[in-house]
Amino acid sequence: MLDIYTIGADVLRGQAAPIDKFDDELAAFVETMFVTMKQGKGVGLAAPQVGVPQRLFVIQIDGDKPRVFINPEIVETSVELASFEEGCLSIPGVYADLDRPAEVRVQAWNERGRRFVLGAEGFLARVVQHELDHLNGVLFTDRLPERSRDRLLKQYEKRMRA
Ligand SMILES: [Zn+2]
């Protein structure tokens, strides 16, 4: 299991680099990402969250299969928005409702270097967008209105001190 970096760590704020080697080492890293995500009871985990600034994230939501996204790109988003409550393993213990596009179409590669295009809706679409943000140095709190962001971050700091 890998350490999960929390808000304040520089690695969470950079642009992650594309992956160009699809080898055994990458497959092993993906395995470890899933283990770490499950230990943290998360549904998604992006490589920068474990200190690796590369364009990769994993997702497993209840009732769905494990999914790996490498060099992902959102190629289409719905105009329609949906509201879901978000949390993040890098800002543990705080949650907030957030609007984002309800559906997205994402192109990515799996750990064997196979390209795929996925149309995602509902909670999966939400998690894809949250994880993709991590590859661009964006945390979900950045997308909240300033007042709710301040309130949430204060709540987080208080939790961390307790
Ligand atoms: Zn997150």
Image (cartoon, grey):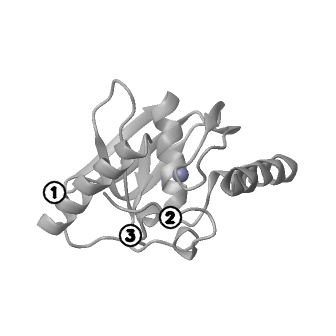
Name the residue type under label 3.
Gln
- Residue pushed farthest left? 24
The residue closer to the viewer here, 148 or 112, is 148
In terms of secondary structure, where does tag 3 sit?
loop
Q: Is residue 156 left or right of residue 34?
A: right
Closer to the chain start, of discs 1 and 2, is 2
Residue at (39% x, 56% y) in the render: 72
In terms of secondary structure, where does tag 2 sit?
loop
The residue beneath circle 3 is 54
- Disc 1 residue lies near ligand 1 with CB under 8 A: no
Q: Residues within 10 Å of mark 1 (few under 14, many from 20)?
A: few
The residue closer to the viewer here, 160 or 59, is 160
Name the residue type under label 1.
Arg
Q: Are marks 1 and 3 in contact (CB under 8 Å)?
A: no
Give the answer, above or below, for where 72 lies relative to 119: below
Q: In terms of image quadrants, where is residue 14?
A: bottom right
The residue beneath circle 1 is 112
Residue 81 image point, x, y percent:
66, 33
- For the residues labelled 3 and 2, the Cα–Cα distance comes to 14 Å
Give the answer, above or below, for where 91 lies relative to 59: below
Name the residue type under label 2.
Tyr
Residue 89 image point, x, y percent:
52, 50
Q: Nearer the viewer, mark 1 or mark 3?
A: 3
Q: Nearer the viewer, mark 3 or mark 2?
A: 2
Residue 152 image point, x, y percent:
76, 48
Residue 5: mark: 2
Residue at (32% x, 28% y) in the render: 64
